[in-house]
Image (tube, rainbow, N blue to C red):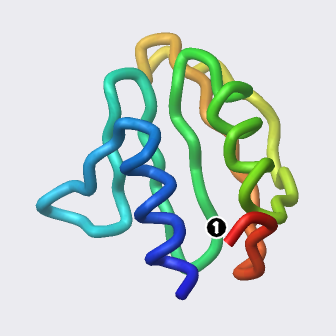
Amino acid sequence: MWNEGFHEFAERHGMKRSGNDFCVYIGDEVWLLSWVDDIIVVAPNTAKIIEEMEKEFTTKNLGQNINREDAKGMQDDRFHTSSNSNGN
């Protein structure tokens, strides 16, 4: 299933699922927030994790990098992933 593959991806990249919300994965500098097959990436540099996602999943970037003061200078990227994965 899609969520199992995404869960494995997040864990391989050092993120842990939130105990309060199973749609939130938290790493040292990366947060992934998922809903069905849409994902918001919050990180100082979103390009690195997005590049890794594009290696495994079919993605479509639906947004742009946005620097937000309320996120302490982190960028967020919104994009859609297909439930079909390239590698799994």
Residue in the image at 26% along x and 48% along y:
16
Q: Choose between 12 and 50: the one closer to the eye.
A: 12
Q: Is residue 7 left or right of residue 61?
A: left
Q: Choose between 25 and 63: the one closer to the eye.
A: 25
Q: Is residue 32 above or below residue 2?
A: above
Q: Is residue 51 left or right of residue 11?
A: right
Residue 64 location, x and y as percent? Answer: 81, 36
Give the quarter of the image for residue 44: top right
Residue in the image at 24% along x and 65% along y:
21
Q: Is residue 44 above or below residue 4?
A: above
Q: Quadrant of the C terminus?
A: bottom right
Q: Is residue 18 above or below residue 30?
A: below
Residue in the image at 74% along x and 72% along y:
85
Q: Choose between 57 and 47: the one closer to the eye.
A: 57
Residue 47 location, x and y as percent? Answer: 73, 27
Identify which amino acid the numbered label 1 is placed on. Answer: Asp
| Residue that badge 1 annotates | 38
Residue 30 location, x and y as percent? Answer: 45, 31
Which residue is at the far front?
A: 87
Residue 53 location, x and y as percent? Answer: 69, 48
Which residue is at the far left?
A: 19
For label 1, the SS is: strand
Q: Choose between 70 and 44: the one closer to the eye.
A: 44
Badge 1: few (under 14), some or many (20 or more) residues near its Cα, within 10 Å? some
Q: How many marks?
A: 1
